[in-house]
Amino acid sequence: MFFLFTLVIYGLGLVLTAVGGRLTGRCATWCCALCGLPLWVVSGTVASLCVALPQLALAFLASGLGITGLAVGAALAGAVTDLGLVLALCLLRRSVTVDRGAFCRKCGILLASCAVLLLFANGGTLSHTGAGLLMALFVVFVLESIVYQHRLVYDEGLCMMGVGENPPSRGEAAPGPQTMAFPAMSLRNSLLNLGGVVAGLVLLLAGAWALLTSATALANRTGTIQALWAATLLSFGFSLPLLAEVLHHPFGSVWKRFAERCRIYPPAALPMQMLNSAILSLTFVLPLCSLTYRGPLPVGAQFRAYDLPACVLLGGVLLAPPLWTRRLYRWQGAACLGLYGAYLAAVLLAPLAGA
């Protein structure tokens, strides 16, 4: 009975965080547009940040309550799942073309973030210096996103991201919508979107609380480490809405209709958004957890032994071909999925204490 009730709470938390995150993201981008911010600024800042809202909400609550295993796990295991599962399945379904410069720079930020964590969390805690360096990398990421979106909007010779066997040539727009349609400026639209932001944040925090409660209860009842549940139930649960979009599963049709109404990025940009989400988990979520925890953030042995090496390997696999070509290949998806399977096997079969 206990496990059934806990799973119900977990499922409710997943629904609330998915709906709240999308609603907050969509209405926040609309509010920024209604305030007169250029589209390239909104797309490079707010839209990118909204991708990682579920992990951010859970990590914020967990670190504030001192549950650091779940806080750090939501960030690190979430980054591994974004790259090793969701992005891998995107690549397995069809080829993806990217702008070489932007993709390589963002992979560089991801690998630099992993290097900072390996150096400054080696002793078991993330020092304030390490958190500051991660925040500096977050600023670099935001500036890179803004510059990329500015060049994209003004068609400065960028290769648009595309999906399929025939990638768009340089300067040619990829098929499908590349921008979002914003509502006209009016008091009604402003109030509706502001209310949507508030309602979305309430749903998001309520869902994060339900997920945190269920994961903590399962860890305490089974006597397992918190990192185990962060790497499985939480990270996989956060990826379910994205998997519904990637796999076009019929059970995800209801969610997809809602996601279409609350879309904050073009469908073809999903692979790049997964990379953005992984970067934000490391460069924004972890420093915020450090601030909320009000001390050196504990980073358990399992995260240092499994999650960080997995992020480095996944980033290396993704970075290799774009150094000389504009295409991401299916073999990269297979390699990333294999690395994710090995990561899950290590987490489940050989858990380490202190996480």
Image: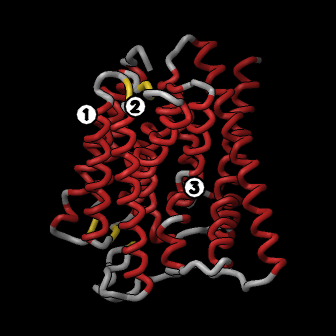
Please state which amino acid type lies under the numbered disc 1: Leu
Estimate the spatial distance between the alpha carbons at disc 1 and disc 3, rounded to whole Å: 37 Å
Estimate the spatial distance between the alpha carbons at disc 2 and disc 3, rounded to whole Å: 21 Å
Q: What element carries label 2?
A: helix
Q: Where is residue 2 in the image (x, y as percent from the top left)?
A: 74, 17
Q: Which of 207 and 115 is in front in this view?
A: 115
Please state which amino acid type lies under the numbered disc 2: Leu
Image quadrant containing the C terminus? top left
Q: Which of 151 and 80 is in front in this view?
A: 151
Q: How is the image coloured?
A: secondary structure
The residue mark sitting in front, 1 or 3, is 1
Q: Where is residue 12 in the image (x, y as percent from the top left)?
A: 74, 39
Q: Can residue 132 be seen in this view?
A: yes
In the rendered view, does 316 fall on the left or right side of 226? left
Q: In the image, which disc is placed on residue 119?
A: 1
How packed mark 2 is, by other alpha carbons closer than 10 Å (few <14, some 14-19, many 20 or more), is some
Location of mark 3 (residue): 244
Q: What element carries label 1?
A: helix
Q: Do the residues labelled 1 and 3 touch (CB within 8 Å)?
A: no
Please state which amino acid type lies under the numbered disc 3: Ala
